[in-house]
Each structure stands twice: as structure tokens, then as C-alpha cells.
Image: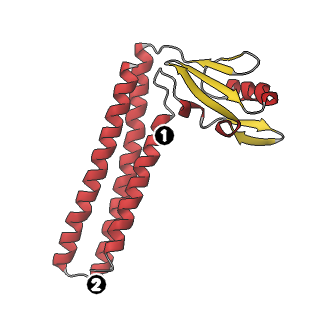
Amino acid sequence: MKITEPIIKEAQEKMTKAEDSLRRELGNIRAGRANASLLNRINVEYYGAPTPLNQMAQISVPEARVLLVTPYDKTSLKNIEHAIMASDLGIAPMNDGTAIRLVIPQLTEERRKELAKQVKAVSETGKVAVRNIRRDMMDALKKAQKNGDLTEDDLRDLENQAQKVTDESIKNIDKITEDKEKEVLEG
């Protein structure tokens, strides 16, 4: 029985990581309101090296649909502006000489529906990852049983336990997805 406990614990940790990954991925989907995580993927050319924007500037949300990027080094303002324009955000930065304002445009109903579909697609990817983890866990349990480390009854109990862990993770993913869909559709 001792051999199998790490198998389930490891799978549970992997499923939690899959949920966290889903949260990060969904955080990148623009929902019509300002969110500092929109800028997480932007790298700025800074002294010849690509540097994450969130390490070069303070990113704040002064209003519901405005992001304010205040660089720690004012000389990097132009580079930050160029990096934002070159990104796939589709938002034009406004440089006032000390900071950059990004006004998030209001989403159309059609765009909201597209984003909701995108949320579902990303969510499904997360569910597939969880199912793959479950499959690997089941394979490891069956291998342990085949090696004589488990009886059939132990295997059945552990498979039930594994299914409960998987169901819980899928339920968490559904909740995360539901919250993001609501955010996208309400704007």
C-alpha cells in the first residue's frame, strides 16, 4: 500500500498544477476590463536583453478599463511603448512622458461570444491534461498490482480514490471556467 500513496499524491499535485496553468492561461484572455495579467507575456528590449514588462514597470489599474504602466527607469518608456504596440493585445498605448496608459476598449457582443468559446477551448485543454494524469496514475496502479505490490481489492479502492481526485479536479476546472465565462460575457 505504501508504494501507491505517492502515485496518487503525485497525480493530485500534477492536477493542481494543471488547474493553476489553466488559471494563468485564462488570465491572458481579455475580458473587457483592465487586468495587469494582460501584460504578463510582454517582453521589452532593455539594454539588449528581452525583459518581462512586469519586472521593468509598475502596472496598476486606476480605473475599471485603464491600465497604467509606470516604468522604474523613465528612459525605457519608448521601448515599453514599442513592445506593447508590437504585441497581440490590439490596444494602442498612450505615452504621457512619465507613464503609459492603456485603455481597454469595450467588447462587442460578438467578441464576447468568441472569447467565451476561447475560454471553453482552453478549459477543455485543462480537462484533457487532468484526464491524461489520471490515465498515467491508473497505469502506474495497474503496474503495481501486476508486480504483486497490490491486491485486486486494493487496486479497486485506489482506482476509486483516483477517480475521486480526478472528479474533484474536473469540478475545480469547471468552476474556474464558469467564473471566467461570466466575467467575459458580463464585461
Q: Position of residue 180 (x, y in %)?
A: 38, 31
Q: Residue at x 35, y 66 (%)?
A: 9
Q: On the image, which quarter does residue 86 sit in?
A: top right
Circle 1 residue: 25
Q: Is residue 165 left or right of residue 115?
A: left
Relative to residue 179, is residue 70 drawn left or right? right
The colour scheme used to paint the residues is secondary structure
Name the residue at 20% across, 76% down: 154
Q: What secondary structure is found at the residue carrying circle 1?
A: helix
Indicate the position of residue 64 as horizontal and vertical percent values: 49, 18
Neighbor class of circle 1 (other Cα within 10 Å; few <14, some 14-19, many 20+) is: some
Q: Residue 187: x and y, percent?
A: 41, 19
Q: Amino acid type of disc 2?
A: Asp
Mark 1 vs 2, N-terminal side:
1
Mark 2, residues whose alpha carbon is within 10 Å: few (<14), some, or many (≥20)?
some
Mark 2 highlights which residue? 149
